[in-house]
Image (cartoon, helix red, strand yellow):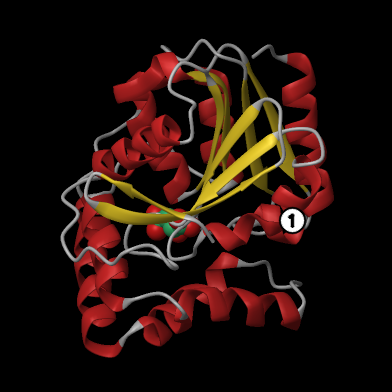
Amino acid sequence: MPTANINGVQIAYRDEGTGRPILLIHAFPLRGAMWEGQIAALAREYRVIAPDLRGFGTSQIVPRTSSLDQYADDLAGLLDQLGLGPERVVLGGLSMGGYISFAFLRRHHERVSALILADTRSQSDTAEGKQGREQSARLAEEQGPRAIADQMLPKLLSANAPEQLRAEVRHMIESNNRAGIAAALRAMAVRPDSTPLLATIAVPTLVIVGAEDAFTPPADARAMHTAISNSRLVELPGAGHLSNLEAPEAFNAAVGQLLDSSVA
Ligand code: MLT
């Protein structure tokens, strides 16, 4: 994978295809490779950029990441380096990728032509949720990514997900670094409530969710759809939280429709 020095950190990324640019932001605690099925399909017609966020995959490990704004600014820097400074992109994020999309919109909204909010939510963490993040951050630091995989895997995929997919997701999690995981948990814990932002989103938006998502359930997606006037809601039957992995064809079709119905 190519890498770029962004804000003093080596960021690894995929950059496939040509045409209208789509930037895909991965979930926690995964890596850009979770978008393989989208890259393969969408890069036939579009330019798909899928980085490993700082601290994940083959990007540089940065133990202290103060907020999700840092990831958003890395993405803006990556787009600049890829010659996409003046051009608007289709921004897509799943779960934590969605939280980072909100940070990106707050800081760089003029760079976005359309939006994909997948299996995510606008609310910040509750006090209990924040405590859970800190416990998980310590678990990651003390016991490593395998303990995080054990904790999260039952909720990341639906009960019917094939064993092979479960193993692939486990592999992606376990190949990450404990410090990068802990940093992201602490950054997610202090993210602001993005609910007030929703009414300001004017670009065409796809809100998509697995019907069996146990982390960010369809009720969260429906609330975002109601608040974003120019949005379409798609619920993927049978899919869990990582809906792009469990229902890639339906996911890609919904993204294709967003692209067809919006302008660059
Ligand atoms: C994710 O999939 O990115 C995480 O489950 C998000 C979260 O922990 O809130």
Residue 65 horizontal side relative to residue 144, left or right: left
Horizontal relation, residue 117 to residue 181: left or right: right
Q: How far across and how far down the image is residue 35, in percent?
A: 64, 54
Where residue 243 appears, x then y in whole percent?
67, 54
> On the image, which quarter does residue 212 sit in?
bottom right
Would you identify the image quadrant in which residue 221 lies?
top right
Instruction: Report the residue that reaches farthest toward the bottom.
Output: 143
Please report the residue visible at 43 percent of the width from the left and 60 percent of the height from the top.
Answer: 28
The crowding category of the residue bearing disc 1, from other C-alpha atoms within 10 Å (few below 14, some 14 to 19, many at least 20), is: some
Residues 229 and 101: in front is: 101
Q: Circle 1 sits in a helix, a strand or a loop, which is it?
A: helix
Q: Is residue 140 above or below residue 81?
A: below
Report the side of 248 relative to 222 (left or right).
right
Picture coordinates of residue 226, whole percent (x, y): 56, 20
Instruction: State the residue position of label 1.
Output: 37
Residue at image position (72%, 24%) is 258
Q: Tell which of 193 and 260 is nearer to you.
A: 260
- Rendered view: 106 above or below 98: above
Q: Is mark 1 within 8 Å of ligand 1?
A: no
What is the quadrant of the N terminus in the image? bottom right
Is residue 99 toward the left or the right of residue 44 in the image?
Answer: left
Q: Residue at x 34, y 30 (%)?
A: 194
Quadrant housing the C terminus: top right
**Ligand 1, what quadrant?**
bottom left
**What residue type is disc 1 on?**
Gly
| Residue 128 can be seen, yes or no | no
Q: Position of residue 17 (x, y in %)?
A: 72, 40
